[in-house]
Amino acid sequence: MATSLVAEQLHAIWHERPGLAGWASTVDHKRIGKRYLHTGMLFLVLGGLESMLIRAQLADAQLEILDPETYNQIFTMHGITMMFLFAMPVLSGFGNYFVPLMIGARDMAFPRLNAFGYWVFLASGIFMYSSFLIGQAPNAGWFNYPPLADRDFAPGLNIDYYTLGLIFMGISTTGGAINFIVTILKMRAPGMTLNRIPIFVWGELAMSFQIVFALPALTLANVMLELERRFGFHFFGEAGGGDPLLWQHLFWIFGHPEVYIIALPAFGIVSAILPTWSRRRIVGYTWIVVAELSTALIGFGVWVHHMFATGLPQITLSFISLASFMVAIPSGVQVFAWLATLVAGRPVLRTPMLYVLGFIATFVIGGVTGVMFAAIPLDQQLHDSMFVVAHLHYVLVGGALFPIFGALYHWLPKMTGRMLSERLGKISFWLTFIGFNLSMFPLHILGLLGQPRRTYTYQEGLGWEPYNLISTIGTFILAAGLLTTFYNWYMSLRRGEPAGNDPWRGETLEWATTSPPPHHNFDHIPTVRSREPAWDQPDLADGAQPIEQGGHPLTEGHITLSTSVLDARPQAVVHMPHSTPWPLYLTIAMTILFTGMLVSSILIVALGGVTTTGALFGWFWPRRETQET
Amino acid sequence: MTQAIEHLPSKLAHTAHGPRAFGWWGMVWLIATEATLFAMLIASYFYLRFRSQPEWPPSSIEAPELTLPLIMSVILLSSSIPVHFAEAAIKKGSVTGLRIGLALGSLLGAIFLGLTWGIEWPEALHHFTPRTNSYGTMYFTITGFHGAHVLGGLVFSVWTQVRAWKGAFGADRHLTVQNFTMYWHFVDVVWVAVMATIYLSPHL
């Protein structure tokens, strides 16, 4: 059969070397995506262990499980881990794996940059966690305010791990965001016009735009803080004419969009799961896309609502308060579009759907407390109390963890080719859902009663003990729920039922190829004529749309198509780079460089500088296969 | 369907530059994120100026001399002209034109950098250092950031020059040249903002 001949030819062109060499040099977006996912899940375990330590310490009044300094380090690393090392990488991982599949491409636009991004994420995560080895993990909270984070009050290496680690990681995040943008703008299969892009892909695009314009603020703030700590520059210290509020502005110009950097792709997951499991096209496609993009935009105008208690002028506060109320509108639009899809469809209540419903319930509660915080008097009353902790966990666990676990149940059969246990899935969901609400809902009450956040213990007799105990029990139930999914995942890899190409009758292109997909994703790059191509185009079966229907085998080389930004018309054939270990070498060299900066050793910095330059030359040195285009 | 067959890949070019190439878009977004970084830096400058000081520059530091910075501005901004002609030359297939344009642009860039780090900085250091106060800090941070970008542009330029010697570029193969010129123009445009912030605004 002609198709299998094409598949064989493509396999010969696109397969990568086996063994250690192949492991170190892969540029396949699917392998990289899985790495992001697996590594991010490992960090979830670490961050989860930290949360259990925090909750164990707070279970009763005046416990001594953690001393105050360790407590500070643990809750700081918990925040950093869950934001930067779990949520962002895992959502990037799903994006890496599924964006090229959903848009009918053979890989990401910059495969080597993609590999580099993963290695740098891994290296910077290890870099930050190595701080525990010398007992000096970051300890000033994940938003790291000076003067507490300045040299006078934090003389150890704790904060330097934070600043250098996040600068290092920013290289990975920025590269990844640019890669997503170019991939989504330029690599969509012919016919996938802007109004046919799957909403999950829109979510990754909106996230990437936010990273491009928000992350520089964080990087810059960290560079400034490091210059101040190491060389006595004056940015944040009052003494030399600096201003600690400058840090807060820069941090939250990044930090508030960061919430949407995590939430927008997670919303995208929800919009990917809902139509399949409601057996219906999503309601209000255009509204949802506009809502995602306008959230990304308005998200840049609300950073000061993290600073309502800093004594800024009233007019500033009022303006930001207004914008903060406004940002609830696009979120509301999406929630109603999802609910309408549910109502108008024939929902099937299997595990992915349960997680989506759990997401809607928790996220709406987090959204409501968010609107409460947009009111300045209430914010000033509850600032830095446990109420804030409850709010942000409802937003982020509701808005990211539930969609991510829903996505596991929805997409793992595609990624591994094996089914998961539905029974374990349901058990896992209910443990997670009940455990989460038990752990976080009481914190609302504790906040109203006056318990401050980030304080390692509390006095007896304030009536806080029962709520704290319930919260601690809830945390451990939540952990059991997550572990159940990991066990389910492990068992499915060992002896799960084969999934087949399309176990759920999905609507987007990833369901039109094998599970797991071949190295080249599709035997023929399809021509798309619908927003739900896998439902409307019977010619797409098995990833090989017949040539007379517009399928492109592209067996002439290691090539893919470049298509136009708006209407995805083919413009050129692009030769893609082959697998290479240089991204790994460059990462190792840069790790030496950052370690040198951490320990203030000119020798190690010089070594790192030389090896980094050498690795860059090695990477870009022209080879026969990567001729100039 | 007929449209699809019309665009069959066998009829498509196997080289791409400009908005058809992935690399061109990569450079566009790299510049976008770098421009944001500079915008934040300049915003921080004015934030510290308006928040903390009754007078600026503070503590009897004089507002910067303008003669040398204006000369430097003319040199750096004019370097965009040969770089522009270098790109125009390779679009017509002239590798010689490309190499001459690149060489002239790099020469002007190198002179600019030499003036910054050889004369302007040592002169400023007579009066203040980055550790003196927030004015000194911002002065050296912003000019330092920009200088580092010019240096990066010079390395990029030399790399492009070497590739040109090796015959890597032609009328329809010059994405690297396009990316270099885009980056170089960006660094020049940023200088206008740096000049206005660091050298002109203290006189206001």
Image: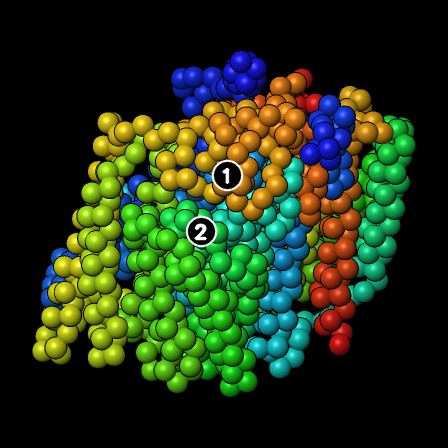
What residue is disc 1 on? A534
The spot of residue A449 in percent (x, y) is 21, 79
What residue is disc 2 on? A280
Q: Is residue A71 above or below residue A113?
A: below
Specify the amino acid type for callout 1.
Ala
Q: Which label was assigned to residue B29?
A: none
- On the picture, is A499 further left or further right than A256? left
Whether pointer 1 and pointer 2 mark residues with C-beta atoms closer than 8 Å, the reply is no
x 38%, y 40%: residue: A504
- On the picture, is A256 further left or further right than A387? right
Specify the amino acid type for callout 2.
Arg
x 41%, y 49%: residue: A279
Q: Quadrant of residue A499?
A: top left
The spot of residue A47 in percent (x, y) is 29, 50
Q: Is residue A517 above or below residue A286?
A: above
> Mark 1 belongs to which subunit?
A
